[in-house]
Image: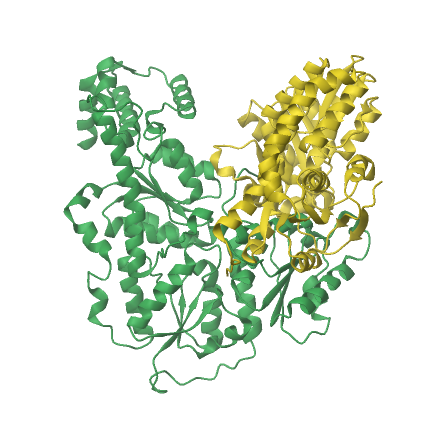
Chain colours: A green, B yellow
Amino acid sequence: MELTLWTYEGPPHIGAMRIATSMKKLHYVLHAPQGDTYADLLFTMIERRGSRPPVTYTTFQARDLGGDTAELVKGHIKEAVDRFNPEALLVGESCTAELIQDQPGSLAKGMGFDIPIVSLELPAYSKKENWGGSETFYQIVRSLLKDQSKESKQTWQEEKRRPRVNLLGPTLLGFRCRDDVLEIQKLLGQYGIDVNVVAPLGASPADILRIPNADVNVCLYPEIAESTCIWLERNLNIPFTTTVPLGVGATQDFLKELHKVLEMEIPQSVNESNNSKLTWYSNSVDSNYLTGKRVFIFGDGTHALAAARIANEELGFKVVGLGTYSREMARKVRPAAKALGLEALITNDYLEVEDAIKETSPELVLGTQMERHSAKRLGIPCAVISTPMHVQDVPARYSPQMGWEGANVIFDDWVHPLMMGLEEHLIGMFKHDFEFVDGHQSHLGHLGGKGTQNTNKEAAKTNLQDSVITDGVPIWTHEGEKELSKIPFFVRGKVRRNTENYARQAGCREINEETLYDAKAHYKA
Amino acid sequence: MSGATLLKESGPKEVFCGLTSIVWLHRRMPDAFFLVVGSRTCAHLIQSAAGVMIFAEPRFGTAILEERDLAGLADAHDELNRVVKNLLARRPEIKTLFLVGSCPSEVIKIDLSRVAENLNIELKGQVTVLNYSGSGIETTFTQGEDGALKALIPLMPKSDQKKLLLVGTLANAVEDRLVSIFNRLGIDNVESFPPRQSTELPSIGPETKVLLTQPYLTDTARELKNKGAEIIEAPFPLGVTGSTLWIQAAANSFGIDKSIVDSILNPLISRAKKALEPHVEKLSGKKLFLLPESQLEIPLARFLSNECGMEIVEIGTPYLNRDLMKAEIDLLPPNCRIVEGQHVEKQLDRVRDSSPDLVVCGMGLANPLEAEGISTKWSIEMVFSPIHGIDQASDLAELFSRPLRRHEILNPTKTLTSN
C-alpha cells in the first residue's frame, strides 16, 4: 500500500483510453463502475475535444455483483457494437472489474462478431498509464497484423518510388503530439520521405493494416511505441529509428539515422545551423547570461532526456538535477544522469522531487505541471516540458517540441521564464530608486524570489528545524544580511546555506560581510 | 404529488462516484483528512476533478492498493495501519481522519470500520478515525457527503436544547447569511452540520429541528431522526420560492408569528425578484434538459421553470428519494418528465431530438454537446457555488443565463462546429 497525494500517471486503462480515443473507427468496452467515467473529462476538457471518447463503461453496481455480471458485460458489448459499428473492438477492465474476473475479452470473443476483438489485460495494481498505452497499442497492432507474412518486400529503390515511413507513438494527452506530427511530416517532406501511416493518433484499424507498406518505422515516443516497433521489426522486418528529434542536435541525428536506415545519402543541409533559430539565438551576445544557469529537469523519460541534452549542449546551462517518474525509462535516464555527474532521481513522489529541487537550488526548473507549482512555491522560474497534461499544455497556436520549429519553441519557452526571474532581480535592484513604485512585481507574482530567501512559512519551518538540530548555528549580522540581500534571489538560498556551512567549518559564530566574501572565495577555490 | 411523470432507465451511466464529494468536504472541515483506500484510479479521479496541484500537500490522499495487498486481507489491514500512522506523524494538525472506502476496497472487503476501531484504541483520542464508503458501486457523487456526515453522527453529543440544525455543506458566506436571517426571525440557536471544525460537532436531541440544505442526505436524515431529531419538511433553499418556503417551514416549526416572518422576508423577496428580472428575460421560454449527476436536478428544475420561465424537457436524477423530494415534486409544473437512473446514449439521443437551449451535465459531456451547438452548464458548479437562499437567487439564475448570453454573443446566427 502506497500513500499517494498526487500521481504523475493514471492507471493503465487510462493509457488504453488514450490509444482508443486517438484512433478512429475503434470502440473500447471498459468493464468498470460508474465513477470511472470521470476519465472522459481528461479528453473533453484537457484536450478540449468536441467528441466523447469512444468508450462504453459497463457501470456495474454493488447489487449486480450478486447476479450475473458476465451477462451484463455481454449486453453492453452487443449494444456498443450495434450502436457504434466499429472496425475493431477493444475490450478490457479497470481496477475493480479486474477483481471480479469476468474476463470480458473472452466473453466478447465468444459472441460471434465479424470484427477483430482485442482483449486487453492491464494489471491495475502494478502498472500505470504509459505502460497501459504502450501495451494497448502493441496488442492492437499485433492482433491486426499477426497473420501478415514476413516475406521480404521490395525496397523503395527497387520499386522506384520515394521512401515511406510510419510515425508511431503520438497520442492524445501526450505532450504536444498533435504539432510534433505536423512538424515531422513537414521535415520529412523536405527530404523527400513520405509518411505512410501515423498511429495511433488519427489512425483507423484499416490504417494499422497498412503499416507494413512502410520501409521504416519512426519511433517518435518510445513510452508508447517502442514495444510495437520492436515487434514489427522482429515479425515483419521493418527497422525503426531510435533517436527522438527533440532539439537541434537530436533532430540532426534523427535525420542521419533515418537516412542511414533507408540507405539514403545524408544531405549536407542536415547540418546547417540556420535550420532552427535556436542555434543563432543561443550564440547571440545577449544569451551570454544563460551560461552555466543551473537547471533541474524532471518529467517523462523521453522529454527529460531530451531536455538534458538541449540544456547542456545547445543552451550552455548546467544540469544540476535529472529525473523521471517513469520506471520503464529509468534504464535510459540513469546513464544520462551519470554522464552529467549526477544521480538520476527516479520517483513517483512529487514531494521527493520538490525536496530535490530545494536541495539543488536551481535557477530554472524544467518539469511537469507539478514541478511548475513546486517551483512557484519556491520562487524559481519554471517551464513545462512533459506530461501529465494540463489544459495549458494544449495551446491554440502551433507549438511543437520536435524538429526545427520545436527547437525554436523550446528556446522561447525556456528562456522566457528566466527573463522573468531576471526582471525580478532588477526590480529588487532598483527598488530604492525614487521612480520605483512600491508593490511593483514581475510576472512571477508576490512570491517571486522569496522562496529561496526562506521567507515562506514552509521554508521557515525547515530552517527552524535545521537550527534546532544543529548546534552552534552562526548568527547573521545586520551587515551580513544586507550584503546577502544584494545577491540575486535565485542563488540567495544557496549562498546562504554555503556561507553557513563555511562559517560552521571555520568556527565563526557570526556571519558578517567579510564572512560572505570568505565563503565565496572558499567555494570558488 | 403533482402530475410529474416518473420513469426509470438503466444502462451505461456517466456520473461521478461518491469520492468526488471529498473535493468540497475537505474545504468545509480544514482539520480533517480524507484518506481513500483504493486504487490509482481513485487517486487520479480526485486529482482530475479537484485541481490538486495548488496545494503543497492536500488534505486528502489515497492509500493505493498494490498486488500484495490483494493477496491477504490481514496484511492489507496492517498495511493500512502503517500508512495511517505515517500520515498522522507527518500531519500532526489532523484531528479527524476519514477512511473512505472505494470500489476495490469494497469488493475485496477490507473492513475499514475494524481498522478505524483499532486505530481509535491505539491513538487514544488524539485523532478520531471514522470510515464511510464513497465507492462508485454504491454511491453517486454527492452521496459521498451523505456517507461522511452519517459517520460523524455517533460522535454528536446529546442535548435537550431547542435548536435549529442546518444539515448539509453550505458555502461559509451563505451559511452566515442564513443564520443571521434565522436570528432576525427570533430563532437564536442555529447550528450547522457539518461544522467548520470537525471537532466542534453540534449536539443533538429531541428538541433539535433539522432543516436540510441539500437534497442528497438520505441516510444522514434517517440517522438524525433515529437520534430523536425532527426533520422539517420543506423544499430546498434554491431560488426565491424554495428559500422562502424553506425558511417559513423552520419558522412555523418554531412557532414564529407569520406577520414577523413576512415583515422580515418580504423586503428580501421583492429585492431578489427584481434582481432576477434580467435573467428571467434571458431564460424565459428556453428549453432545459438536466442530465443526472448532483441530485440537485429536481430543485433546480423547479426554480428554473417556476421562477425563470424555462420549459423543462427532462429531469434526470441518479436516484429518487420520494420522501425527501416530495415537497419539490409537488411544486413542479404538470407533466414534467423525471427519469431516474440513466442510459447515457439513449439520453443523449433524447437531448439531440429535443434540441434544448441549455443542458445541465457532467464535465465529461459538456464540450461534446457544446461542439454540437448546444449550450451547457456543469452540474458540479452547483456544489461549489454559493447558490442557497433568497439573496442568492439571481446568482443562481445567472449561472444558467450566462452560457445562453455567451452563445448569443459568439453565434448570432450560426451554430458551432468542432472536431
The image position of residue B19, as x and y in percent, is 65, 40
* Residue at the image point whose x is 48% and y is 60% from the top: A171
In the image, is B295 to the left or to the right of A226? right
Image quarter (top left, top right, bottom left or bottom right) of the N terminus of chain B = top right
In the image, is A393 to the left or to the right of B241? left
Q: Is residue B32 something one can see in this rendering?
A: no
Q: Which of A435 and B121 is in front in this view?
A: A435
Residue lying farthest to the left in this orientation: A285
* Residue at the image point whose x is 77% and y is 22% from the top: B250
The image position of residue A431, as x and y in percent, is 23, 24
In the image, is A282 to the left or to the right of B78? left
Would you identify the image quadrant in which residue B221 lies? top right
Q: Is residue A406 something one can see in this rendering?
A: yes
* Residue at the image point whose x is 73% and y is 24% from the top: B247
The image position of residue A101, as x and y in percent, is 72, 57
The image shows residue B197, relative to residue A206, as above or below, that is: above
Give the tally of numbered discs: 0
Q: Nearer the viewer, residue B228 or A515?
A: B228
In the image, is A254 to the left or to the right of B102? left
The image shows residue A31, relative to residue A216, as above or below, that is: above
The image position of residue B399, as x and y in percent, is 58, 39
The image shows residue A485, relative to residue A306, as above or below, that is: above
